[in-house]
Image (cartoon, helix red, strand yellow):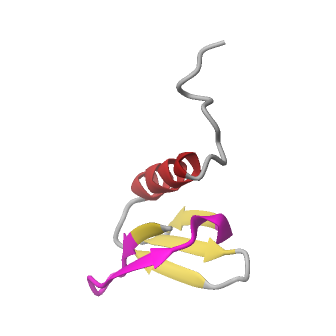
């Protein structure tokens, strides 16, 4: 789960596994696989960093960045 902030300032947690798309319109809009949309204060880059961190935490991405081949 990643913690994000709605435009009204209320924080909420979102399961990053259900995120299909993150866009900037200019507000950051997150579209889930079921079509539901959330508009958040974080930038697309911040959302991407949170998602990547979450994926690493649950070992979806493995150790790709920390192991050099």
> Looking at the image, how many numbered discs can be counted on the residues?
0
The image shows residue 48 at horizontal and vertical percentages of 50, 53
| Residue 8 percent across, percent down from the top left | 29, 87
Q: Is residue 9 magenta?
A: yes
Q: Residue at x 50, y 68 (%)?
A: 1
Left or right, 42 with reference to 16:
left
Range of magenta residues? 4-20
- Residue positioned 51% across, 73% down in the render: 29
In the rendered view of the protein, which quadrant contains the C terminus? top right
Residue at the far top in the pictured view: 69
Q: For the point 60% across and 15% down, which residue is it?
A: 68
Where residue 28 sits in the image (x, y, percent)? 45, 69
> Where is residue 15, by image quadrant?
bottom right
For the residue pair 67 and 49, the one nearer the viewer reads as 67
Asked whether the viewer can see residue 36, the reply is yes
The reply to whether residue 26 is in sight is no
Residue lying farthest to the right in this orientation: 34
Left or right: residue 59 versus residue 6 is right
Answer whether residue 43 is magenta in the image.
no
Which x, y percent locates residue 35?
Answer: 70, 83
Front in this rendered view, residue 59 or 8? 59
Q: Residue furthest left?
A: 9
- Out of 46 and 68, give the one closest to the viewer: 68
Which residue appears at 65% of the width and 65% of the height? 17
| 39 in relation to 69, above or below | below
**Viewed as shown, does residue 4 lie left or right of 8?**
right
Compared to 34, does 53 lie above or below? above
């Amino acid at each position: 789960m990643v913690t994000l902030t709605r435009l009204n300032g209320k924080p909420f947690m979102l399961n990053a596994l259900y995120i299909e798309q993150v866009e900037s319109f200019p507000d950051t809009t997150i579209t889930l696989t079921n079509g539901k949309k959330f508009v958040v204060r974080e930038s697309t880059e911040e959302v991407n960093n949170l998602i990547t961190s979450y994926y690493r935490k649950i070992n979806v991405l493995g150790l790709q960045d920390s192991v050099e081949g």
